[in-house]
Image: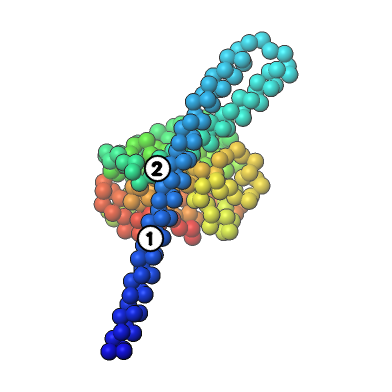
Amino acid sequence: LLEIGHDLGAALMTARALEGERQLVRELQQLDDHRTQLIATLSHELRTPLTVISGNLELLGELSLDDLAAHLQQAMTRGTRRMQKVVDDLLLLAQVSDPQHPLQQVPVDLGEVVQEVCSLVETTARAKRLRLDVDLAPGPLLVAGDPAELDRLIGNLVSNAVKYTPEGGTVSVTTSRRGESLVVRVSDDGLGISEEDQIGLFRPFFRTSNPDALLHPGTGLGLAIVATIIERHGGAVEVDSRLGRGTTFTVVLPADGVPVAVPAGAVRSS
Ligand code: ADP
């Protein structure tokens, strides 16, 4: 009887510890939800006054200003644009991170998304004398997902490749099928990312320590948005990069709702 009592006591303690853990998980989840909600509300509230400021600055720019006033107007316009970009990215990140935010699921052709994104960056790439190679798998590559989010996902990766590749380099984007999955690969022979920096790459506000990369303006939110959108779509992303040599991001998405072979949401560096 003493032994049974001992076993029961131990089982009770385990049960209490488990309940405690569940409670802790629930509380952490609630805190995380509050955090996401707070970010969404704040960014939403900041958007309207920022639109008013930038509209007025634009009007100011049309007046005939002396040199100093024109200089101040331009500096304020640049600062406001930067703030708008941070606020827009934060709002988007909060939206796609919110489990209550429904995922629109319509058939989207990844090939079309890649073509659209690449035509948008063409001018910037040409100005930097970059070679932009696009190699699409034949036929439609259909994913069940949100067109705007998928556009943003590919757009962020391609514009990063263009941004972080010095003049005369090459950026290539390819699509392919891998079993039941679809693959988009965005490669560049640009700055590359060190092994230490690859660890934090998908965290919000993360920017690498590479001084050459820091010369380019950025919010550090682009890849956090990329990772969250991929996770929402049941996909995975892998990074292969060497400092000074270049970077390849490989995104695997389920073909029209079929789960991908790699663990969902996996974010890996190799
Ligand atoms: P940012 O707005 O700073 O570009 P991201 O979240 O898109 O933010 O990227 C985070 C950091 O990762 C960047 O600051 C940059 O240092 C690095 N990075 C992203 N893509 C590349 C790339 N293709 N080549 C080299 N570095 C990259």
Q: Position of residue 40 (x, y in %)?
A: 45, 38
Q: Position of residue 157 (x, y in %)?
A: 47, 43
Residue depicted at 35% across the width and 66% down the height: 19
Residue nearest the observer in this picture, 3 or 260: 3
Residue type at numbered disc 2: Val
Tell me, yes or no, if residue 207 can be seen here. Answer: yes
- Any atom of ligand 1 within 8 Å of the CB at mark 2? no
Residue depicted at 73% across the width and 19% down the height: 68
Residue 71: assigned label = none
Q: Is residue 6 left or right of residue 90?
A: left
Characterize the local packing of mark 2: few (<14), some (14-19) or many (20 or more) Cα atoms within 10 angstroms. Answer: many
Give residue 106's quadrant in the image.
top left
Secondary structure of the residue carrying numbered label 2: helix
Residue nearest the observer in this picture, 217 or 187: 217
- Please give the residue where the numbered disc 1 appears in the rendered image: 23
Instruction: Identify whether 16 is placed above or below 159.
Output: below
Characterize the local packing of mark 1: few (<14), some (14-19) or many (20 or more) Cα atoms within 10 angstroms. Answer: few
Instruction: Identify whether 232 is placed above or below 13.
Output: above
Q: Position of residue 31 (x, y in %)?
A: 44, 50
Work out whether mark 1 precedes mark 2 in sequence or the reverse, and give the earlier one: 1
Residue nearest the observer in this picture, 233 or 111: 233
- Please give the residue where the numbered disc 2 appears in the rendered image: 96
The label nearer to you, 1 versus 2, is 1
Residue depicted at 38% across the width and 60% down the height: 23
